[in-house]
Image: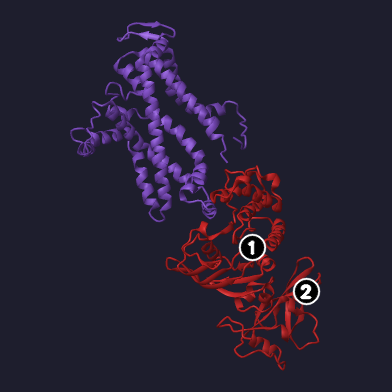
Chain colours: A red, B purple
Amino acid sequence: MATIELIDLKKNYGAIPAVKGVDLSVADGEFIVLVGPSGCGKSTLLRMVAGLESVTSGRIEIGGRDVVKAEPAERDIAMVFQNYALYPHMTVRKNLEYGLRNRRVKNEEITRRVQEAAAMLEIGPMLDRKPRELSGGQRQRVAMGRALVREPAAFLFDEPLSNLDAKLRVQMRVEIRRLQRRLKTTSLYVTHDQLEAMTLADRLVVMNGGLVEQVGTPVEVYERPATVFVAGFIGSPPMNLIDLDYLRAQSAGTDLALPNGTDLVGIRPDDMVLIGPVEPSIALKATVELLEPVGGESHLHIRLAGSNQLAIVRVPGRPSFVEGSEISVFARIGDLHPYNRASGNRTD
Amino acid sequence: MQGKRTVFPNKVLPYLLLLPQLAVTIVFFLWPAAQAFWSSFQREDAFGFKTTFVWFANYTKLFADPVYLNSFRTTVIFSLAVSLLSLGIALLLAVAATRMLRSSRIYSTLIVWPYAVAPAIAGILWWFLFNPSIGIIAYVLRRFGIDWNHLVDPNDAMILVVIAATWKQISYNFLFFMAGLQSIPHSLEEAAAIDGAGPTKRFWTIIFPLLSPTTFYLMVINVVYAMFDTFGVIHATTEGGPARATEILVYKVYFDGFVGLNLGSSAAQSVILMAIVIGLTVVQFRWVERRVQY
């Protein structure tokens, strides 16, 4: 149980900056997900908190204690690795016990904790097997168990689900969330999968190019992306970004009510509709390029009339559109996200 | 071996393709081995005028001979010392080299060099260094009050051949340990570090057990090397002396056969050595190559 504070944290590899100054306060028991494209510095950040990477400058506090100079073992954290990093020559039980034995925890206490974790993760029957005798999902559970038995101040997860197949990933995602809710252990979780990020996080930290783009609850980040990058990164399919000049020309006479400095407008594919709403809205003419059915809904790829701008509209069900046909799409004025292209920031 | 089985339409062709390899094996291995086996049951006079079939006389005589038994003991001491030393030093160097980030390649290259040196040259090199009259190391040792003389002192002689033989074998072991270390995922060590194990504990509880397949393999290879491939080293330095203190089994085969011209006994000794090699090979295949450590 602990808070984590990152203060102006920086990391350079030689002359190349990987993390360019990150500030973050994690409350006790909070589940924070670091999300971003590969190479954005999220894993480096996590590894710095774990003590596996040296810190170039800045401070890391875990439970109010500055740990920048502390060894990984002294930080009271447990980490789940992407490749699980189970000790292949030890049984599952030995794997779970290893960290406790190194810390000279009493035997009865070790037995109790291992049994508890095994019950919680349903790996009891596998305790005497070696990791190579387990399936991917079971190994994942053991890796989680090794973190659990330690009862650490914080859990660190480094893309723990990316080696699992899609079905198991969903299952383990739910399980991780359930466990964390129950144990209320502060957690930092790194992923590039935005669905994982959205579903797991109390708060999301969206990173890009070594910097934090936005911190907020998943709903906040989804509803009000702070930057053009976040707008394009969070949400699937991604937000359509359309030139304001083009919108103005298409919807002459409509008051778009956008703040000064806006030159780019974002519209979520869900906010584009095919039937004009009652609220004030803009109308755009477009050509159907492609219809992608994805099950319960379909993604309609369109090209806006008189431009090369492509956009995606999310439509319910499996409508029939002839590719190349002309349609009109509508978006409510209230659903427009105003941005400034040069600064990349939101303008309202 | 799994894999596709090729079916030859012609029954003779496969044997024809195997013939060159078979010919080499027969001419250079099976034939001499058979001859040695045959002569080990014979006694031949030094001039080759007369041979008598003596059944197991050569063998019984050998095992009653304290000199031969002593050579056995010398061989065991020598090969264990060489194997353990070269394994230990190579492992130490490999661990140190993998810790290096940029200079690791240069170190590896340098450490591998001795492997390219012929055994006799390695022997001569150390012989010069330790030479009681002109050797630099002997000179330094004398400064420290150690009177080094491998020409007279059996222990000094043994240490010299062990050093020379070990030095040459370190390179080979080093390469295998490097490869072994590099195949252990780095995240295991990181996980162990987070699990509260210090560098020494990490090495003995994680790295060393995971290296054990490599270590077992090298152990067998090293024993074979020390027993059979160090003839050059010994011949160039001590010639088995002083007072047979460094006369390992292979050297005795040569000495009794080609110097002492006791061909029957020499043949019997080489048959015994052959049995030892076969034994080691079985160990190698049975336990080392088939055994999955983890």
Q: Is residue A131 visible?
A: no
Question: Which quadrant holds residue B161?
Answer: top left
Question: Which quadrant holds residue B262?
Answer: top left
Looking at the image, is mark 2 or mark 1 nearer the viewer?
Answer: 1
Q: In the drawing, does residue A201 fall left or right of residue A63?
A: right
In this view, the residue in front, B259 or B135, is B135
Disc on the earlier residue, 2 or 1? 1
C-alpha span from label 2 to label 1: 40 Å
Q: Position of residue B8 (x, y in %)?
A: 61, 31
> At 51% from the left edge and 47% from the top edge, which residue is drawn?
B183
Identify the disc placed on residue A344.
Answer: none
Q: Which residue is mark 1?
A: A185
Furthest residue toward bottom: A253
Chain label for disc 1: A
Residue A277 higher or lower than B206, as above or below:
below
Asked if badge 2 and badge 1 are on a common chain, one would say: yes
In this view, the residue in front, A87 or B39, is A87
Chain label for disc 2: A
> At 36% from the left edge and 35% from the top edge, which residue is drawn?
B166
Mark 2 nearby-residue class (10 Å; few <14, some 14–19, many ≥20)? many
Which structural element holds mark 2? strand
Q: Amino acid at mark 1?
A: Thr
Q: Position of residue A274 (x, y in %)?
A: 78, 80
Furthest residue toward left: B133
**Count the marks: how many?**
2
Q: Are marks 2 and 1 in contact (CB under 8 Å)?
A: no
Identify the disc placed on residue A315.
Answer: 2
Q: Is residue B19 visible?
A: yes
Q: Amino acid at mark 2?
A: Val
